[in-house]
Every structure is written in C-alpha cells, then in structure tokens.
Amino acid sequence: MQKREQLYKGKAKSVYLTDDADRLVIHYRNDTSAFDGQRIEQLDRKGEVNNKFSAFIMQKLEAAGVPTHFETLLSKDESLVKRLEMIPVECVVRNIAAGSLCKRLGVQEGMDLNPPTFEFFLKNDALHDPMVNEYHIRSFGWADDAAIARMKELSFKVNDVLIKLFRDAGMLLVDYKLEFGRFHGQILLGDEFSPDGCRLWDVETRKKLDKDRFRQGLGGVVEAYEEVAHRLGVEL
Ligand code: 5GP
C-alpha cells in the first residue's frame, strides 16, 4: 500500500493517506508528550516499541472478539489500519485508583476498584480533556445511545482480556484509555494500546512500567516499555 500525503500529525503519531480511501498508515514517532502536550521529549526506540506493542495487543483483542482498526505491520514504526471516523471521546477503565481519579476524588493511589470504574473524557488538549458524561455525548451529537453502549461494552471486554494477559506476565493493569471510531456502520477500536496510554505495575513490587515514569520524571521510560514487551513475548 502506497503511503501518500500526511492527513494528521498528533503528539506521538503521524497519520498518512494511502491509495485506498479506507486505509491509513500510522507512523509511531519517538516524541513523548505529557501534560496535554506542554512537555515533549524524544525517547529513542519508543516509536518502534509502541508500534510493535500495539500491533500485538490489537491482534490479541481481535482474536478475543474485539473489532479493531489494525490490519498489519508495515515497518518497525509503521502500521496499516482501517480509516475510522473517530468519536472524539476517550474511554477510561480503571481497576486500581491512580492519576486523575486520585486528584479528583482524594483517594489513595493503589486502592482496588471493585467493580472497575469507567469514565468518558472529551478529547481536547486546549480544554485539558475534561470529563464528560453520556448526556454531553448525546447532546453534542458525538455518539448516540447505541454507540455509547457499544463503546462501554467493548471497553469492558478489553478489560477482561487484558487483565489476564498482563497478570499472566506478572503485571497489574491499573487503568487505560481507549478511542473508538466508525467504519462502514461498525464501531471499531482505534488509536493505539501501549504503555503510553495505560498504567501497568509489577505485581510484586508495584514498580511503574508505563508513561507515569515520564510524567513523574522517574527515568528508564523506554526500558520499562521494553520490559513489558519482553514479558508478554512481543518481538521487538
Ligand atoms: P488519568 O485520567 O488518570 O490521567 O488517565 C487514565 C488512563 O488513561 C491512564 O492510563 C492514562 O495513561 C490514559 N490517558 C488518559 N488521557 C490520555 C491521553 O490524552 N493520552 C494518553 N496517551 N493516555 C491518556
């Protein structure tokens, strides 16, 4: 598939048109951002690790019955995906309290959330991705009842699959963010699944193995991502 002009440049990925109107190429860059893009650094190998990591997870999810946009790896840092019409909300599932939940509700990091909780956020850096609810999503026409229900259903299905996958590799899936889009009338999982958009802790030591290492200046960011990949058996 021929890569054509750039359609969109995000904080960590660039998206290119192809000669098929229904297919896009995603290029995973080494750029790493935090705090709504206010801090950006280049981290060696990150694009490659996230590309291969996300491909691995998307294939596991697809096999478990979660439809995704992923088609195939094209190179070390590029993947071919279906072109979705993105729904501009982020779906966050949390199994353990961390991050913005602790700040907002004043709860201790590490508290088990049973049952897991679910939140919608508007994808808008200028507004700092504010939390929104289903009424906002319907009133502003971002998605209807059926699409909202499907995003929640698929988000929890992802949880069932990935809690076990990470647990078997000695990690706790603390929380994660998903984005969905429409493809010929179907809702598919889009964007990426990588340690940039989830929290993973070592099950014994609770060492952070995700982007919080970057956000909190803990160092060893890509090394941690590579460790997660190795534990899962992702070929890098
Ligand atoms: P929090 O709301 O605690 O900041 O984030 C919850 C989870 O969603 C974390 O795993 C975090 O990495 C992910 N997340 C939330 N918003 C974003 C975002 O804008 N970009 C990325 N990459 N991940 C996000």
Image (cartoon, helix red, strand yellow):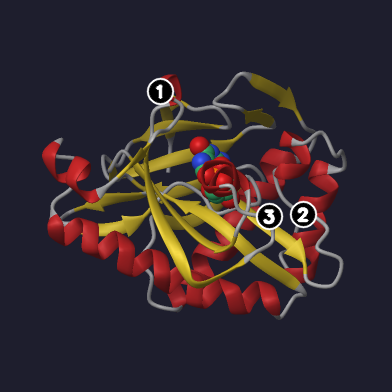
Question: What amino acid does circle 1 point to?
Answer: Leu
3 or 181, which lies in front?
A: 181
Which quadrant of the view contains residue 150? bottom left
Q: What residue sits right under mark 2 in the picture?
A: 209
Q: What residue sits right under mark 1 in the picture?
A: 127
Question: Quick one: SS at disc 2?
Answer: loop
Crowding around mark 2 (Cα neighbors within 10 Å: few <14, some 14 to 19, many 20+) is many
2 vs 3, front mark: 3
**Residue drawn at point x = 61 percent, y = 18 percent:** 38
Task: Determine which of the numbered discs, if any, sits on residue 1 in the image.
Answer: none
Q: What residue sits right under mark 3 in the picture?
A: 109
Dividing the image into four equal quarters, which quarter contains ligand 1?
top right
Question: What amino acid does circle 3 point to?
Answer: Glu
Marks 2 and 3, how far apart at CA: 15 Å
Q: Does the residue labelled 2 lie within 8 Å of ligand 1?
A: no
Marks 1 and 2, how far apart at CA: 28 Å
Is residue 217 toward the left or the right of residue 63 in the image?
right
Residue 43 drawn at (x, y percent): 77, 32
Question: What amino acid does circle 2 point to?
Answer: Leu
Which quadrant of the view contains residue 216? top right
Is residue 64 toward the left or the right of residue 145 in the image?
right
Crowding around mark 3 (Cα neighbors within 10 Å: few <14, some 14 to 19, many 20+) is few
Question: Quick one: SS at disc 3?
Answer: loop
Question: Quick one: SS at disc 1?
Answer: helix
